Amino acid sequence: MIGITQIDHINMRVRNLNESIDFYARLFGFEMKEDRRGDQEPWAIIGLKDVAYLCLYEHPGKDIPREGLTINHFGLVLADFDEALAKLKEYGVPILYGGPVDWPKSRSIYITDPNGHEIELAEYVGGRLG
């Protein structure tokens, strides 16, 4: 077994790099770590130090259907679940599955980014499953 301590990064294809960077910065405070928007195939690494990083590769003009995405969803743990829920509503971000999902020991909010990537926003690490 190879031990790990946290998610390092998630690599995703996006339709519009600037739109995606803005979405993650506005909702979660992700900061630019590496900006390669000037490259022939633009990409960027955004995130929060020692928390989470996303590597976003732009595929402009290419339709990326939901079925073609290479990840199902990724999860982030919220600092304050109720505050996050209020902010998502304030920002007009659609919440999937009719609202927060109640799990046996935790709650989750599911949203999508502008490219259709599903994001699980969890109340507790690992759903408090121990």
Image: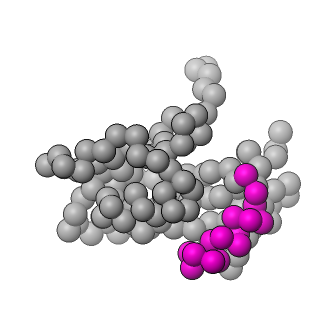
14, 67: nearer the viewer: 14
Residue at the far right: name it: 105
Residue 96 sits in quarter: bottom right
For the point 32% across and 59% down, the residue is: 17
On the image, the x and y values in percent for residue 123 come to 76, 55
* 11 sits to left or right of 26: left
User: What secondary structure is the magenta-colored segment mainly?
Assistant: helix
Regarding residue 94, the answer to whether it shows in the image is: no
For the point 27% across and 56% down, the residue is: 58
On the image, the x and y values in percent for residue 8 come to 51, 35
Residue 89 sits in quarter: bottom right
For the point 46% across and 53% down, the residue is: 71
On the image, the x and y values in percent for residue 19 come to 36, 65
* 13 sits to left or right of 105: left
On the image, the x and y values in percent for residue 82 come to 77, 66
19, 106: nearer the viewer: 19
Regarding residue 80, the answer to whether it shows in the image is: yes
Q: In which quarter of the image is the C terminus?
A: top right
Q: Is residue 62 magenta?
A: no
| Residue bounds of the magenta highlight | 79-94
Residue 35 sits in quarter: top left
